[in-house]
Amino acid sequence: MDPVYGVVLVLVLSAGLGWVVLEMRLRALRTQVLHTPGGLRFEAHDFSLQVLRKEQELCVQYVRGIWTPPAQGAVQGLAKYGRTECTFSALGFRVDVHESVALQSGQAQPTHTDRFEIVMRGANESQLVLQPVNGAVARSFKLFFLQVGHWVERLEYRAEQVRVARLRSEEAAAQAQQHAQLLAQLIGHGAPKEPRSPADLERIAAAQIAQWRQAAGFVGKHSLHQTDANGVVLWFVDLAEDGRITLHADKRTIHSTLRGARIVSTGSELELGLRDAYWTEEEPELSTFRLMAGVPANERRVWKDRLEVSRYGLSAKTQT
């Protein structure tokens, strides 16, 4: 063989081998985000994450990872190699991306390795750990998950709204049933044969109010109520000196305080918005009650002033 030809062949083979090695390294660093029907897909060399919006799930395919199924809880899972797939519910899904550092003897500060660990956790305590992940891939995935995280947060917000609405509805139904049972004991079913006496109406109203006060755990200093012809309380307000309040109207009852309350005069009524047991800073919806229909305007103004003074007192205590 001609020596020159041999040298050229060696150089060509070396260049080809170098190109193959470089391509393999670039492929390991390459990532892409694809818009798929019904979701998004992040693809890297060793793993991918598919967002399934309709199913509200996230499907992960990976080559190297440590998978801990829900049944094991916090127990360390087993390492799995080869193309493997797992699915997480979007609700409660969390991702943590952090760099692995090395602390060598004689060094005060750890050495950055540019090797990362990606930890995916489900609400059911399932967990997937991907390691080691190249720094460029990890940073690209972290940016991708920012928008996925917003989607997860919106899902969780809507799910929490549905949960709170269901709990409020169940609580209102339970209150209505309890009230109906009490009324059945007090006045029975159907219209009375003769009009009830004022004393009888007062007795029936007092029994309803006593039940609400027992549930509230206090007796208000100022109270007012209105009943129908059978003694059924149409609305009731019971205000304690410390700002605690019980309201009943539209067959709903609440035991709360005037902290953060909304007090509005609507012309012929007062409208009060109170924080219920499910109120939060993130979900600041107030439970609204309308009462005092038929009460003279000057008496409604007195009550409005009284409620506002009590609310102001609670606000002043909070600020101090």
Image (cartoon, rainbow, N blue to C red):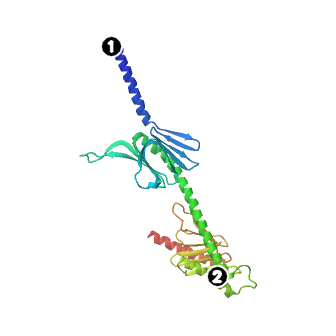
Quadrant of the rendered image containing residue 229: bottom right
Q: Looking at the picture, does residue 251 appear above or below residue 33?
A: below
Q: Residue at x 40, y 41 (%)?
A: 135
Q: Amino acid at mark 1?
A: Pro
Q: Position of residue 214 (x, y in %)?
A: 55, 79
Quadrant of the rendered image containing residue 171: bottom right
Circle nearer the N terminus (2, 1) = 1
Q: Amino acid at mark 2?
A: Ala
Q: Position of residue 45 (x, y in %)?
A: 45, 37
Locate the C terminus and report the quarter of the image it occupies.
bottom left
Q: Residue at x 40, y 27 (%)?
A: 19
- At label 2, counting other C-alpha atoms closer than 10 Å, the crowd grade (few under 14, some 14-19, many 20 or more) is many
Q: Nearer the viewer, mark 2 or mark 1?
A: 1
Closer-to-camera residue (205/45): 45
- Residue 209 image label: none
Q: Position of residue 118 (x, y in %)?
A: 42, 46
Q: Residue at x 56, y 44 (%)?
A: 39
Q: Position of residue 266 (x, y in %)?
A: 65, 70
Closer-to-camera residue (188/271): 188
Locate the N terminus and report the quarter of the image it occupies.
top left
Please state if 294 lies on the left or on the right of 253 as rendered.
Answer: right
Closer-to-camera residue (105/242): 105
Instruction: State the SS at label 1.
Output: helix
Residue wearing tag 2: 205
Residue wearing tag 1: 3
Instruction: State the SS at label 2.
Output: helix
Residue found at the very far right of the displayed protein: 193
In three-dimensional space, the C-alpha distance between marks 2 and 1, rounded to whole angstroms, equals 115 Å
Residue 264 appears in view: no
